[in-house]
Amino acid sequence: MTSNTIDAKMLSKMFLAGAKNLESKKEWINELNVFPVPDGDTGTNMTMTIMSAAREVSALGENADMTALCKAVSSGSLRGARGNSGVILSQLLRGFTKSISGKEQLTIPELSDAFDKAVETAYKAVMKPKEGTILTVARGGAEKARELAKGGMEDMGAFLAQVIEHARYVLSQTPELLPVLKQAGVVDSGGQGLVEVMSGAYDAFMGKEIDYTISAAAQESRPGKSSGYQAQAQAEIKFGYCTEFIILLSKTFNIKHEMDFKAYLESIGDSIVCVADEDVVKVHVHTNDPGLAIQKALKYGQLSNLKIDNMRLEHQEKLFKMSEKEAAASAPASAPTQPPKPVGFLAVSVGDGVNEIFKSLGVDHIIEGGQTMNPSTADILDAVDQVNAETIFILPNNKNIILAANQAAELMTDKNLLVIPTKTIPQGITAVINFVPEMSVEDNEVNMMQEIGNVKTGQVTYAVRDTTIDDKEIKQGDYMGIGDAGILSVGQDMLQVTRDMVKAMVDDSSELISVYYGSDVQEEAAGQLRKELEEAYPGCDIELQYGGQPIYYYVISVE
């Protein structure tokens, strides 16, 4: 029999079930992306976002109170957020948990308030909210919840069922709000993902038999990650030492510090619990080098209740307790810190050639990623730590990474992060080129923002399914030229599609055409394209460079 209230134990199960349901549907959600490109990743981004939180919730166990549960959901999802849909999901969870934290039992009116707070928080996080998206579906569910709560409904099961039913209806209407969805014959993929989370949570509340096991994080083998990350992704390494301790805080431990510390623990182990409570932080981690975890913790305060067990021994025998002095001696000394320079650059990029271009232009650190693998908020914050500068300009170079970059900037407390909202690699290159060291940070920000607005970008890839977009019929396997605002050309001849795409981008004011050819394009073929463009546009300078990017045969900019 179900209850008409929800306690922390039930909410934990509901959250884990929602995460698992989303995970099981992620490939289907990926296929709902409007553009039939081979890197649709809404389902993947939302899944990686919520599973980051689910691992923290799972590690808490069944007896966690509402405050600890809410902190795990909020911090885990914020840190793991990637892609626009993932960031919006993390903000929904942030608002929801903020509303209910500290409560023992959730009633229907309290859930309704939490839904409202979730929607309010998510809308504030998006500069220009667009209807017909996950935001619309979330708002529709919240409005239904408010209606039912005001009507005096007391049956929690019926309440949840009607809220989800209405969310599904709102989802079905998203094509009426976004014509591009209607033309492609799909509903909004982010909204679908949210509905799957809600549906899984409802199943748990109603007592459906569910496997609540959450597997340890499989770190992406993203180029640029340490060998430790790659090894963990390629083999299920068993970390031998169960390490537990309490940090008695001697200085401020805000959410940025908490995220940094958790990210560090994830880099050296798994089964991580890190719960901050006023003046103490409770820590649990399985690792092969407890000294590293302890040394990192000593930066925040003194340690107590230190316990290290060797899990590879049959009887889990306690090995030793380590003093703070011994812990400090077990880790290598930090290298002397150089004074920070005034301004640094951080860019998201993929492809050997493109990476080298950014480095040659003075970018301090590259986050390997882009359309096929959106870095998370935690990835960006971790990269920020690699740049020793007072002010750091972040170049997302992809529209699906801008929100995660903005979220990182909001969470950062000790450096000034400025996000230049570059949506493409050429825009990022233009931004760096137009940075003037003699100008102020503020003037440079304005200047770069203006200059990226003058860049048109087109990208050539292939279609993974049949569809119709912008009145263009597209067949699986066709080549597509995708511009800043939509499909510019379609066909079965890559060179012709590329020529048609450039033609749609060039106008009388165009002076420069830059061509970056990808890893699947031969240098001779790229040279032939350059020759044809020189003949077709004698008034423009044509630059050809090896980009090495996957998926996209050509990335071409016109300025």
Image (cartoon, rainbow, N blue to C red):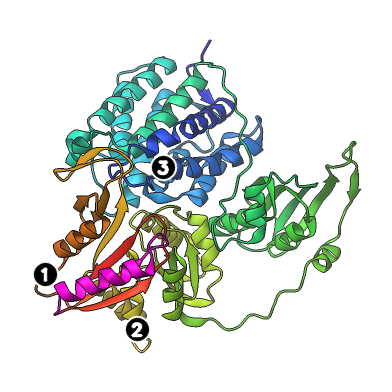
Using the numbered discs, state the Cα–Cα distance from disc 3 to disc 2 in whole angstroms: 36 Å
Bounds of the magenta segment: 516-539
Using the numbered discs, state the Cα–Cα distance from disc 1 to disc 2 in whole angstroms: 33 Å
Q: Position of residue 157 (x, y in %)?
A: 43, 16
Looking at this view, is 518 or 430 the one in front? Answer: 518
Mark toward the start of the polypeptide (1 vs 2): 2
Looking at this view, is 308 or 9 the one in front? Answer: 308
Q: Nearer the viewer, mark 1 or mark 3?
A: 1
Q: Amino acid under label 2?
A: Ser
Taking the image as shown, residue 3 lies to the left or right of residue 440, namely right
Looking at this view, is 180 or 315 the one in front? Answer: 180
Question: How many residues crowd around disc 3 within 10 Å: few (fewer than 14), some, or many (20 or more)?
Answer: many
Q: Residue furthest bottom?
A: 438
Pointer 3 residue? 89
Taking the image as shown, residue 7 lies to the left or right of residue 89, namely right
Mark toward the start of the polypeptide (3 vs 2): 3
Taking the image as shown, residue 272 lies to the left or right of residue 318, namely left
* Residue at image coords 53%, 10%: 1
* Residue at image coords 56%, 63%: 224
Q: Nearer the viewer, mark 1 or mark 2?
A: 1
Pointer 2 residue? 440
Q: Is residue 10 above or below residue 381?
A: above
Q: Position of residue 186 (x, y in %)?
A: 27, 34
Mark toward the start of the polypeptide (1 vs 3): 3
Q: Is residue 33 above or below residue 252?
A: above
Magenta-colored stretch includes residue 220: no
Q: Secondary structure at mark 2?
A: loop
